[in-house]
Amino acid sequence: MRSWLPGANPLALVAAGLLAIPASLAVRDVRTGLVALGAYALVGALLLPSARRALGRVLVVVVGSVSIVYSTWLLGGRDIGTAVAAGLRVCLLAAPGAVLAAYVDPVRLGDQLGQRLHLPARPVTAFTAALQRFEHLGAVWAQLDRARRSRGLGPSRSPVARGRHAASLAFGLLVSAMRGASTQAIAMDARGFATAQHRTWAEPAPWTRRDTAVLLLGAALAAVPVVLHLAG
């Protein structure tokens, strides 16, 4: 059951995440926001294979939501109910997409965009390659960190030293990304990606009943705050 959602069609996962955006507009009070987020949390607990992976992404969204709560309370008349509702709205808007994005395979997404939605092949190929490069940034960061530590350049416990270490890693990551992008662009051009007029696809892009179920589930969860808002 927990491997059911991550193996779904990338288009269905993206659509389920995007449906939370209009749903968040219906969050006008704390009750609606809590019930809607509770529904998403319940489904996530049942279907997601890794709670730790999801919680890490949700935590980033929660930090941003807390900042929204504080700024809304400070600048919006110091109404705590309105401030919390604004934070819940932002959390509902971003959290589902942030969690589901971790299970979107760039290659499968490119197949779906090109074959099922019939988008132009060249932008789809470039978009897929960019997503694959983005996925590798975390691994490159870890490699750069291990390389610096093996040469005795690791940071001390000082916040200043850790900041300098992070800045050095960020610069190295930027250089590595630019070098890798140039190499990939040359390789793609050598294979005819820039001039080909008719393109074939190596893998099929099926749509199964599971994908329909994921899309319907996303629509049902997005309808929860809308129904509560209309009923209230």
Image: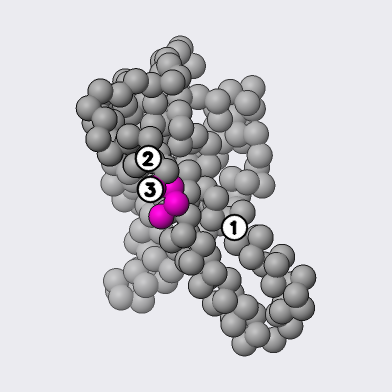
Quarter of the image for residue 90 reads bottom left
Position of 196 with respect to 178 (left or right) is: left
Query: What's the magenta region?
Result: 182-186
Q: Which image quarter is the C terminus in?
A: top left
**In this view of the protein, which residue sits in the foreground, 30 or 130?**
130
Q: Which residue is mark 1?
A: 140
Query: Which comes before the other along the chain, label 1 or label 2?
Result: 1
Name above or below for residue 25 compared with residue 124: below
Q: Residues within 10 Å of mark 3 (few under 14, many from 20)?
A: some
Q: Position of residue 88 (x, y in %)?
A: 42, 53
Report the amino acid beneath label 3.
Answer: Ala
Q: Which residue is mark 3?
A: 185
* Residue topped by disc 2: 190
Mark 2 crowdedness (10 Å alpha carbons): few <14, some 14-19, many ≥20? few
Which of the two discs, 3 and 2, sits closer to the camera? 2
The kind of secondary structure element at disc 2 is helix
